[in-house]
Image (cartoon, rainbow, N blue to C red):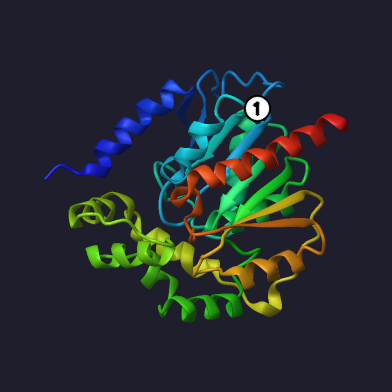
Amino acid sequence: MVNVLTIYMSLLRALMKLVGVKPEAVEIEPGTVMRFWVPSDQTTSNTKSRPDKPAVVFVHGFELDGILTWQFQVLALAKEYAVYVPDLLFFGESITDRKERKVAFQAECIAKGLRKLGVEKCTLVGMSYGGVVCFKMAEMYPDLVESMVVGCTVMAMTESISRVALERIGFSSWSEYLMPDTVKGVKDLLLVATYKLPWMPDFVFKSILEVMFDNRKERLELLQELVVSDKDFIVPRFSQKIHLLWGGDDMIFNMEEARNLKEQLEGKATLQFIENAGHLVQSERPSAYNKHLKKILASLHEDGKKK
């Protein structure tokens, strides 16, 4: 049977081309290549800045690659903003021969890739695992990251946060939840990640399983490096403006976790919930998410003009 997700991704690529976004392979260093979706007139050899279009960088979670995660946001924002969507290492077409699996290496590769693409300042938009990467990027590269919009995430996956979240969703480990090897496993993953999963035939879940869960060894290694000791984690001091945009019915990182994160940020962050939306809020309620996101980005852009 033809894989329906592969067909959809081909159509999505054509649709992205129509709105002015294309894939670009960026060599971060020898042996490490990260795929970015970038404005169509931009390459690493043509890095002319676009002052009329602020750069917005979308960072995906552990479930899907970049463009599948953020397709609705790219379609809504590509005319007004210079949109960049990386595939994290071992997702999509991004790969490395390095043995490094820490979140900091993902952040480093995105930052180096953006520099090669001529991006000097940007707003990060991230969710889930991608939100953790965003926080690390903001900590490591405050000159590059001006502001962030993140949701359904944590600053760092500490042992205590991990333990409570896994108990809440009924799984013994992140690998059990995030790396399914059966159609039922994929269905269970999405049932937890959504407020109300629409009915789909099993061949759709089978297509997702066949396409989205390659590089299993390396992704399992990423998950092993994700959880950090509580005693080793120190909350960084961020200089950026931070907006938390959350699915109000997220089971993985619930409203209490969102409020705890806001408190950790000590007045640096705003927090908004979108009702009837789970962990995958940007896909489940794209219109509501985009409405909030556009308002936030517009306010950030206006604040930037005043400086």
Number of labelled discs? 1
Type of amino acid at the residue the image marks with label 1? Gly
Q: Is residue 224 visible?
A: yes
**Looking at the image, which is closer to me, 158 or 306?**
306
Residue 225 appears left or right of 50:
left
Q: Which residue is painted at 54% across and 80% down in the image? A: 164
Q: Estimate the x, y position of residue 183 in percent, counting from the top left.
A: 23, 63
Q: Estimate the x, y position of residue 248 in percent, counting from the top left.
A: 56, 62
**Callout 1 environment at 10 Å: few (<14), some (14 to 19), or many (20+)?**
some
Residue 241 appears left or right of 192:
right
Q: Is residue 182 visible?
A: no
Q: Estimate the x, y position of residue 128 in percent, counting from the top left.
A: 53, 59
**Label 1, on which residue?**
118
**Looking at the image, which is closer to me, 127 or 33?**
127
Q: Estimate the x, y position of residue 166 in percent, counting from the top left.
A: 47, 77
- Provide the secondary structure element on which disc 1 rests: loop
Residue 240 appears left or right of 247:
right
Q: Residue furthest front?
A: 275
Q: From the image, which quarter does the C terminus lie in?
A: top right
Q: From the image, which quarter does the N terminus lie in?
A: top left
Residue 94 lies in what quarter of the image?
Answer: top left
**Looking at the image, which is closer to me, 269 or 3?**
269
Q: Which residue is painted at 37% across and 30% down in the image? A: 13
Q: Which residue is painted at 72% across and 22% down in the image? A: 51
Depicted 232 relative to depicted 61: above or below: below
